[in-house]
Amino acid sequence: MYEFTAPFQDPSGSPIRELFKYLAEPGMISFAGGYPASDLFDVDGLRSAQKRAYRDSNRCLQYGPTDGLPELKSELVNLMARRGVTCGPGELLVTTGSQQGLDLLLRVLVAPGDVVLTEQPAYPATLQALKLQHARIVTAQVDGHGLDVDNLAALLESGAVPRPKLLYTVPTFANPTGATITRERRIALLKLAVKYRFVIVEDDPYGDLRFSGDTVPSILALTAEVEGSRDWVVHFASLSKIVAPGLRVGWSIAPAEITRRCVIAKQTVDLCSAPWTQAIAAEYLADGALERHLPRITTMYRRKYDALCNELRWQLDDAIQFHQPEGGMFVWARIEGIDSSELLWHAIENKVIFVPGKAFFADKLDAASLRLSFAAPGVEEIQEGARRLKRAYEAALAAGTSSVQSSGS
Amino acid sequence: MYEFTAPFQDPSGSPIRELFKYLAEPGMISFAGGYPASDLFDVDGLRSAQKRAYRDSNRCLQYGPTDGLPELKSELVNLMARRGVTCGPGELLVTTGSQQGLDLLLRVLVAPGDVVLTEQPAYPATLQALKLQHARIVTAQVDGHGLDVDNLAALLESGAVPRPKLLYTVPTFANPTGATITRERRIALLKLAVKYRFVIVEDDPYGDLRFSGDTVPSILALTAEVEGSRDWVVHFASLSKIVAPGLRVGWSIAPAEITRRCVIAKQTVDLCSAPWTQAIAAEYLADGALERHLPRITTMYRRKYDALCNELRWQLDDAIQFHQPEGGMFVWARIEGIDSSELLWHAIENKVIFVPGKAFFADKLDAASLRLSFAAPGVEEIQEGARRLKRAYEAALAAGTSSVQSSGS
């Protein structure tokens, strides 16, 4: 009856959100969400930030500037400085979560048919955003150290991969793989971007959630070491995973010329992100509450991660393989000989849930892969969840329906 | 250096936002903004709504459903019922201001080159959103009673205007004209939509701001009287003008099939609007605070409107013409023989500011027109502002540069 545009003629929602209906089932243990742990929110700190913010109620209640409240922008500039990045207010745009930053950037930079490189596996909402913009998605290989930059360089050199307009990466504690791109690879990637003139889109929501190993500077911070590379990096960050997603405060740092256009797009898209929650975020950051609270989150995430890995190893032994991330929220695993989409149904019967690998592949699916998030459930829930996974695995083997069927092959 | 997409190769921001830099000048009186009056915000009511909302802090701080918090949706369904509209939760989508609702709808329904009808003059951000989606904008004639539906019917019948995919209208206290489409014309428009199978996009942020005359039901409410017409109406509403824009709470009511696709687009665009401000809005509405507070706003807007009209008449006499709106925030005026863009410079010198007509025309500019908003300034400021306009008018006449130059000619 209606004539929908191409991406919406037969639309499919986020494959992760499709799983939400099972979350409500009583007793379900979820490794599925990308949600941060609710019990680690700084409820009191945010309450007092709200009180301070509302002392100037007009700032909370009236329209705000499209690029963000100046006091929040100034706090974010300071936060980025602590992360080794110098930036000015003209490069910084406050967005409704970093998700909106990506949407704005794609509308400004990506015309239908433009080539965009993504890691494979990749964050599904990014794949969706690229489809919405009619980009031509080309996938790049990853390993336990993130994007395989040498391989990419060879493919670009030979012309096997066309010159992209953008390359999208979650370089630190990636979603879904948990992997972190090494410093050497980051430098090499910056040189590639300068050589082939493409924009590296660095999505960095998890960087502060390191619980082991040494800090690796962001790609944006490393632009200081590669001449001309600062022009080719757009960096997204967010308070969603380190303060609270309900603020919907993300930001982008991009060359001023790109930022200016994103601001104009945002005028049309929603005028401004909620000034009230921006003011709360500004007060929270100005108070130093983030630095005080963050260790509480990383300590607990470390404990949860240990619980998950130990119990998976104990229960599933060699049947399961996974790299060990040094932070973030995700473990990316493979259970050889199992199709994780089939396994999911047995898991749901056993009251445990995860995201099967197929959600994260644009092509050449690894059907044995799955993503487990350890952020939201408690330690004992995690242990029980791993035991249930074992039972689901046995049920899948018994059902015999689970031989791997790679959709790509 | 960068290859921007077509709408951003040579981007221009909102013509209204371009004026913002003058607002900061000391002593400037502004008739320019579309901002509601800050001194009429229900600061105490919203503070206590925030306290109640935060009792369930997790609801404020965690991610929320993409289509909106259920408790807010339920309050908005009730609010719409008081406005004579029955709707279900599957038709209602909470958005970051109604501006986002329009953006989502256009992405779902408008392909490049699709014809979209707008009133002329029209809200500039709508024109920008249409350009961003590469729509073909066709303008429809308005008079003191809003859209001239008979004229439109004749043009559609003769083929002089191509069948549109959408028609965008602000039917009640329009921005910028202040005009309200009569009930008869609304019914006729619904019949046209059914006959020619186009979607009426009814943008209704001002409907509650009536300070004189009788209520006219929304186009959505009148679908009950025209068989089959409910399928062809998408309605946008917002708390920005009646509670506070800083909440960024708008909503759309659309056929379920359209809403479902807008929800999927929103997953990609920003996942969800700020749950914290949604929770505040839900508590505010549940308490009945809107109904208690609204009369305070409309009473003051009536006073401000009277002050503006009386003083304009007193100062400029027959030199100025305007229709008298029965509500809203805007007076649309013409000063014969003056180019309002020229007049603006003399006005700024005299410390008063307004939006010249050219911001609102997609084609065939009426250069003598201007928009005056009476919502934000106080009564005495309004009177002084009108006196300054008189001086600007005299200065423009004396400068002799102000003979009307219609851009169409």
Image: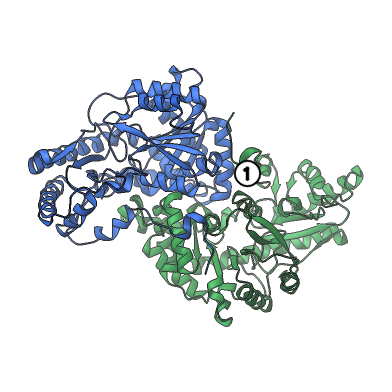
Chain colours: A blue, B green
Q: Residues within 10 Å of mark 1 (few under 14, many from 20)?
A: some
Which residue is pictured at 53% across the width and 47% down the height? Answer: A272
Task: Give residue B120's position: percent from left, percent from top.
Answer: 72, 60
Task: Give residue B260's position: percent from left, percent from top.
Answer: 43, 63
Q: Quadrant of residue A287?
A: top left
Q: Is residue B59 in view from this perspective?
A: yes
| Callout 1 secondary element | helix
Q: How many marks?
A: 1
Task: Give residue B300's position: percent from left, percent from top.
Answer: 63, 63
Front-most of residues A406 and A275:
A406
Residue A215, compared with residue B409, is above or below; it is above
Q: Is residue B409 left or right of residue B37?
A: right
Q: Chain of mark 1?
A: B
Which residue is pictured at 45% across the width and 19% down the height? Answer: A224
Q: Is residue B4 left or right of residue A251?
A: right
Front-most of residues B316 and B117:
B117
Q: Quadrant of residue A375?
A: top left
Q: Quadrant of residue B142?
A: bottom right
Q: Is residue B287 in view from this perspective?
A: no
Circle 1 residue: B7
Q: Is residue A348 left or right of residue B378?
A: left
Task: Give residue A226's position: percent from left, percent from top.
Answer: 45, 18
| Amino acid identity at mark 1 | Pro
Front-most of residues A168 and B45:
A168
- Quarter of the rendering occupied by the N terminus of chain B: top right
State the residue lying farthest toward the front. Answer: A409
Which residue is pictured at 42% across the width and 48% down the height? Answer: A128
